[in-house]
Image (cartoon, grey):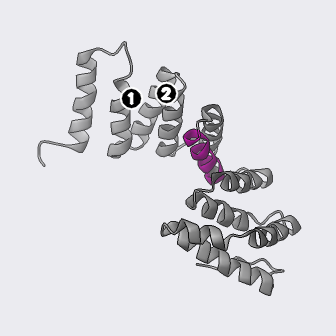
Amino acid sequence: MEQVKSPQSGPVEESLSQILAEARAAAEAGQIERAISLLDERVIDNVDKVIDADPSRTDLMFLMANTFHAARELDKAEGYYRRILDHEPNPLAYINLGHICHFSGRLSEAIRYRREALELCPDEASLYHDLGCSLIFVGRKEEGIEMLRKAVRLAPDDPDIHSTLLFRLHHMPQLDPPTLYREHKKWADVHAPMSL
């Protein structure tokens, strides 16, 4: 992994970079306790000092946010993602905040962040998928289904996105069996053709 440096970086920051790289690797390997032990208060304070001295250091903010996210320290991850957004609009920060909010039950916030991500990346099918799921969870089923349909149009070969649409269609009370059959047939024609 690259070392996190700025033009003013010195030995302290290089040492931090090494610790952060180790913590990230441990979190990604599922060694959550090790990752958290590496990110003690001293390390966090030193990283925050570097960021406070140079608020453009979104690279450090992302490293911290992603490491805490992987270590399931979602409050801390959320704080760093928000700091990134204080500095600049960033689709990855919006996407990750959307995930954190969705899976912690804060669906209105998730919808807001997912819409922000879509504004920055309007051709990304997975963002329509995620927004559609959040909308359905808050009861806005028609709007959610439309988002899922857009996702399928943008990524017609993605079986996961298309499967989510099919699954969610079953929650639409006004959908009749022949329409559901046609939707399943479309899925089968793309993802399970008879020629297999």
* Amino acid residing under circle 1: Arg
Residue at 21% across, 37% down: 188
Density class for disc 2 (Cα within 10 Å; few <14, some 14-19, many ≥20) is some
- Residue position marked by numbered label 1 in the rendering: 168
- The mark found on residue 71 in the picture is none
Mark earlier in primary sequence (2, 1): 2
Q: Is residue 77 above or below residue 111?
A: below
Q: In the orientation shown, which residue stands out farthest toward the right?
A: 53
- Label 2 secondary element: helix
- The mark found on residue 136 in the picture is 2
- Label 1 secondary element: helix
User: Is 146 covered by the magenta stretch?
Assistant: no
Label 2–label 1 contact, CB within 8 A: yes
* Corner quadrant of residue 101: top right
Can you give x and y, in whole percent of width and height, for residue 163 in the image?
Answer: 33, 38
Please report the bounds of the magenta region as a residue range: 92-104
Residue at 78% across, 77% down: 6
Foreground residue among 120 and 137: 137
Residue at 58% across, 36% down: 105
* Amino acid residing under circle 2: Ile
Can you give x and y, in whole percent of width and height, for residue 35 in the image?
Answer: 60, 70
* Corner quadrant of residue 153: top left
Question: On the rendered structure, is 182 left or right of 171?
Answer: left
Residue 40 seen anywhere in this rendered image of the structure: yes
Q: Is residue 67 above or below residue 145?
A: below
Residue 121 seen anywhere in this rendered image of the structure: no
**Location of the N terminus (image quadrant):** bottom right
- CA gap, disc 2 to disc 1? 8 Å
Residue at 79% across, 55% down: 87
